[in-house]
Image (spheres, rainbow, N blue to C red):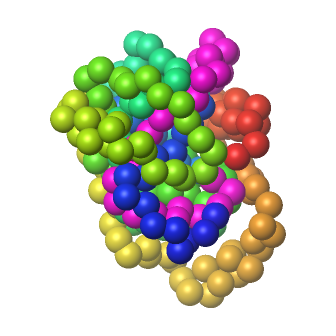
Amino acid sequence: MSEKQEYRNACITLHQPWASLLVHGIKRIEGRSWPAPVRGRVWIHAAAKVPEPETIQAMEHFYREIYAVDGVTDVVFPEFYPTSVLLGCVNVVGCVSLPELANWKSLSEGVRLEGQTQFCWLCEDPQKLVIPLEMRGWQGVYNLQRKIADAAPRGLRPVNAPTQMKFPMPVSLESSSERDGLESEETGQPQTKSLNPHLSPKLKASIQGAQAAANQFRR
């Protein structure tokens, strides 16, 4: 991904159920094998593949468990996971590596557990379209077509997310030496987190289920 490209109305296509979970404010970390080339509003488009019920179940279980770690038990999931449509947008406020997220001590444990990939895009201020717009998606980050970009903002509405996420910028790790040691482990390949042995068996199972669901797709 080139960071020199200019984005006027940046958009990214995600598979379901991840796309709707992001727009509904349940998902706060967008995981990628490459760093975010854009900051600010990013539109979220749902890919054409219809999600398997097992995939939806695995991801809803994962988010139910990691929110419970932070004492949040009233997570309301989307009723539907539509495909081939523009769903809404989020505000990408930053991007950190997986080790940076895991050691960002001012974040809650549930948010830190959400990161499972090499790069973690930090997403705030989710908004959804009242009526999703049918459109074709593309790989990577791309610009919305002008007519869609002009029409879509008028249909945005705030969402009732489980929590109002605000990342405490800048990133604050436990120590610079710990940060340097962790960052040196980057290999340029998709990266997953080793499970903390102190996690409960139920939480471990939910994380493993989410990882298995995501492994259907190579990002």
Q: What stretch is highlighted in magenta?
A: 32-58
Residue 82 horizontal/vertical position (percent): 48, 18
Residue 155 horizontal/vertical position (percent): 22, 30
176 in relation to 146, above or below: below
Q: In which quarter of the image is the N terminus?
A: bottom right
Q: Which of 141 and 116 is in front in this view?
A: 141
- Hey, which residue is sitting farthest front in the picture? 147
201 in relation to 176, above or below: above
Q: Residue at (55%, 36%) from the top-left corner? A: 137
Q: Residue at (65%, 84%) from the top-left corner? A: 180
Within the image, what quadrant is residue 166 found in? Answer: bottom left
Q: Nearer the viewer, residue 4 or 75?
A: 4
Q: In this view, does 189 lie to the left or right of 120?
A: right
Magenta-colored stretch includes residue 38: yes
Residue 95 horizontal/vertical position (percent): 50, 65
Magenta-colored stretch includes residue 96: no
For the question of whether residue 107 can be seen, the reply is no
For the question of whether residue 54 can be seen, the reply is yes
Q: Is residue 40 left or right of residue 158?
A: right
Residue 36 horizontal/vertical position (percent): 53, 62
187 in relation to 49, above or below: below
Q: Which of 150 and 27 is in front in this view?
A: 150
Q: Residue at (39%, 30%) from the top-left corner? A: 87
Q: Which of 26 and 138 is in front in this view?
A: 138
